[in-house]
Image (cartoon, helix red, strand yellow):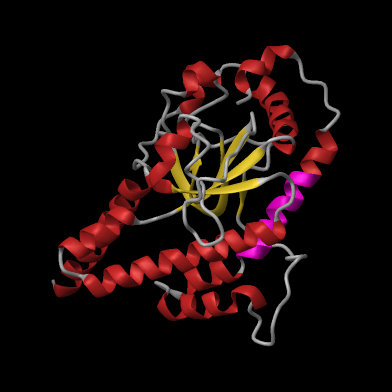
Amino acid sequence: MVQKLNSYLAILFLCLSFVTYAQDEGVTRPDYKNYRTDSTFKNFSKIKGMVAYAQINALKNGALLVRLKTNSKAIKTLKAKGNIDLATKMERETQLENKIIMSAYKNEFNFCPVYFFYSDVSDSVKKSVLSGVFVDSTLNVNEAIVCNASFYLIAESGVLYNSSIGIVPESYAKSLSEQGSAAREASIIVKNKYFIQLHNPFPYFQIKAGVAVNSKLNKDGLYDDIANELTQYRKIARNSDDFKQMKNMRGVVAAFNKSLVSFYNEHSKEHVGPEIKEFVY
């Protein structure tokens, strides 16, 4: 009986943890739907390749906006309940994680210009507000950083979905939200300006790490410029998997950058007709 009760409590804890994460990062718990019967998947197979080719060429001349987590709602809730130590731990862990992610992109990503913003200004970014929202290397919002790119995509870590949304025109995309089933976690997921996950053949996610070509390791296997951050992260991280993911982040970004370069080189001269213009944003 006690064992069964403990099992129920464990399941309840996992559910509550997912809900807290979802509320903090603007993700709703997915309800599975048979999206292939949805009207948004009309001509999906026919045009998804052309849309991907147009997207990679536009990104080469555009920008990548990386969304960083704040966990602000979860931290606020912990403080309100008097769990100050846990709130402080989460604040520090989030800050270190963001420093490591930023360092990874700055050292290993050169496909296009990259900018960083916090999740709590996502609504502004979704409305194409691209000034007064980006953070500098100190993780502080810097009013001087402005993105003037006419085309940009969003990258973040989080839940990779079996998408419920096909290829849709921009006018329709503004009102859509993901309803597909969650597949797994990924270190990098690429979305359009309305935070809708992209489709293959675009290399829209990265899970495994490659070789971090621009990184220098010290004797402990930590990167020299962020060795202290990684050491501190290992001490306070929720579990060893989190530390391993952060330690491998440069390799993940390097592999992602390589995939973008390869896809661009393969399709940079691909002819894309005007009929797909409304699907590229």
Q: 198 left or right of 120?
A: right
Task: Determine whether 54 is above or below 2 in the image.
Answer: above
Main SS, magenta region, reads: helix
- Residue at 62% across / 43% down in the picture? 64
- Residue at 60% across / 56% down in the picture? 207
Q: Quadrant of the N terminus?
A: bottom left
Task: Determine whether 152 is above or below 219 in the image.
Answer: above
Span colored in magenta: 249-261
User: Would you say residue 103 sits in the magenta stretch?
Assistant: no
Q: Where on the picture, by quarter, is residue 150?
A: top right
Task: Check the image and name the residue furthest to the top.
Answer: 275
Foreground of the two, 266 or 66: 66
- Residue at 29% across / 50% down in the picture? 19
Image spot of residue 261 (x, y percent):
78, 46
User: Would you say residue 260 sits in the magenta stretch?
Assistant: yes
Image spot of residue 154 (x, y percent):
56, 41
Foreground of the two, 142 or 11: 142
- Residue at 62% across / 68% down in the picture? 248
Q: Is residue 137 visible?
A: yes
